[in-house]
Image: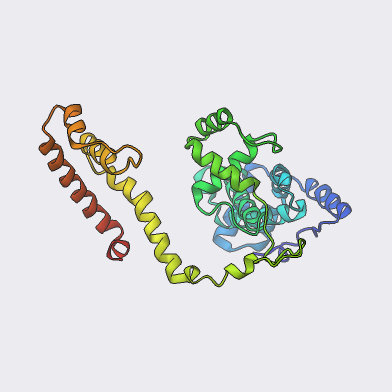
Amino acid sequence: MTATAMSMPVLSNHATSLESYIHTVNGYPMLSQEEETDLALRLRYQHDVEAAGRLVMSHLRVVVSIARKYVGYGLPQADLIQEGNIGLMKAVKRFDPDRGVRLVSFAVHWIKAEIHEYILRNWRMVKIATTKGQRKLFFNLRSLKSDNSHSLTNAEAESMAGTLGVRKEEVLEMEARFNGQDMSLDPMLDDGEESIAPLAWLSDPEAEPTRVLAHANYESLTSDGIRQALLQLDERSRRIVESRWLNDENPATLHELAAEFGISAERVRQIEVKALQKMRTHLNGAYPDAMAA
């Protein structure tokens, strides 16, 4: 199912052409629920391309409406619409009318997903959001931060963190990525002195793919892995391990924890040893390659 097969209107970045496209798609009639269901069933069981075309055409205005919300990223509106159209076609292909949901509700997710991917691919040369959580934070932070001319205060970061359900540090880190500038790979020789361009760093042996993968495995092990391993412990054991091993500034002593829990220091040590062994067993099962390394 392609745009050509369905004779979609031509879309370009020229202002007049864009206005003409929007005027055209707004003129396509909306479908009733009965018409939509009939077309969807024809597409699903008869592979009717004409039915798919009518479903797409009637929802092109929805893509335009959604794409307009992302013009603040400095990317051409026509490109945003085009990516949204790809998401719409994917939604039409997967739409199941038997679920009792209208196509517009189902398609919104696919349209936004394609636009998000396009923005993240093109907004910066160095990708600022690489995980699902980071992507969600990036787009939410963009929408919540109305004034991009100043950095967030601690109070603003705390408020946003509470709204988004993340740590304040994650908000501040994403804002730093968000406000960062792209750096030229070529040397800047404006002061008459020799300089080392970032391009030279690309030959760093530490960037060799196998080392990068090993480092990524290690980072995963020491962050998400340890957090998951801690969840395998009871509350007292977790408190002991965190106080003894994860508090770099002021690790607790056996005697301090013994006083806190009303047990002997030797008993605290036994609990610690057992807890660490349980964590290692969990990590061995979840990250065998990283542990072996």
**Residue 103 appears in view:** no
Residue 40 image offset from top left, x and y in percent: 59, 53
Q: Nearer the viewer, residue 146 or 261?
A: 261
**Residue 87 appears in view:** yes
**Residue 187 left/right relative to 212:** right
Residue in the picture at 73% in, 66% down: 4
Residue 288 image offset from top left, x and y in percent: 28, 62
Taking 278 as reference, is 208 above or below it?
A: below
Residue in the picture at 77% in, 62% down: 190
Residue in the picture at 63% in, 48% down: 36
Residue in the picture at 65% in, 59% down: 125
**Residue 280 left/right relative to 83:** left
Q: Quadrant of the C terminus?
A: bottom left
Residue 195 image offset from top left, x and y in percent: 67, 65
**Residue 223 left/right relative to 183:** left
Q: Nearer the viewer, residue 183 or 74?
A: 183
Q: Quadrant of residue 193?
A: bottom right
Q: Nearer the viewer, residue 1 or 177?
A: 177
**Residue 255 left/right relative to 151:** left
Residue 244 image offset from top left, x and y in percent: 26, 41
Q: Quadrant of the N terminus?
A: bottom right
